[in-house]
Image: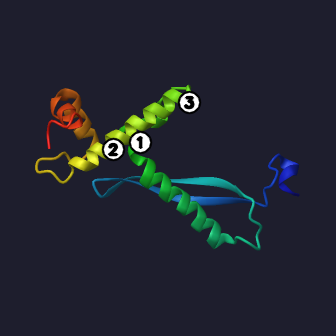
Amino acid sequence: MDGATIGLAGAAQIFRIERKVQTLRKGRVTKTSFDTAYGVTSLGPEEAGAALLQELVRGYWGIETRQHFRRDHTQREDHCRVRSSVAARNLSLMRSTAIFLFEQQRGVPGAKKFPPDWQRKNMRQPRALIDRLMGRVG
């Protein structure tokens, strides 16, 4: 049976991954769960065996966890209900700017170590951040 037969034109392999997921909090495992995930690829078995498929999936999740964790967990980007593509791009730009500004302040004495703390501080007392953005503070 090929992929088109089941509505997945171009699919050469369908695979299943069973995994153990551990949630860490302060370096300790707080929850362990098991789940099953399925994947589809256009790579045939001769091009991608089990080891390569596992590497590709891990590479995808590496990007997801490194690059999108802040947006998803500290800025709740996945919960945003904006449907206008222009508004979504503008919000994404603002989120990227916030991440950039957070990273810039990390080396300063007394800087906040976590994005949510930094965001709360600037929401409560925005003057220092506004002055910095306006070039009034070095």
Mark 2: which amino acid? Ile
Q: Which residue is mark 3?
A: 85
Secondary structure beneath label 2: helix
Image height of 82 relative to 37, above or below: above
For residue 103, say whether it is visible.
yes
Where does the image place residue 55, in percent across and percent down from the top left?
58, 67
Identify the residue shown where x is 62% and y is 60%: 17
Query: Is residue 8 shown left or right of residue 78?
Result: right
For residue 32, say whether it is visible.
no
Label 1–label 3 contact, CB within 8 A: no
Q: Which residue is mark 2?
A: 99
Secondary structure beneath label 3: helix
Secondary structure beneath label 1: helix
Quadrant of the image occupied by residue 41: bottom right
Label 2–label 1 contact, CB within 8 A: yes
Mark 3: which amino acid? Ser
Q: Which residue is mark 1?
A: 71
Mark 1: which amino acid? Arg
Label 2–label 3 contact, CB within 8 A: no
Image height of 99 relative to 24, above or below: above
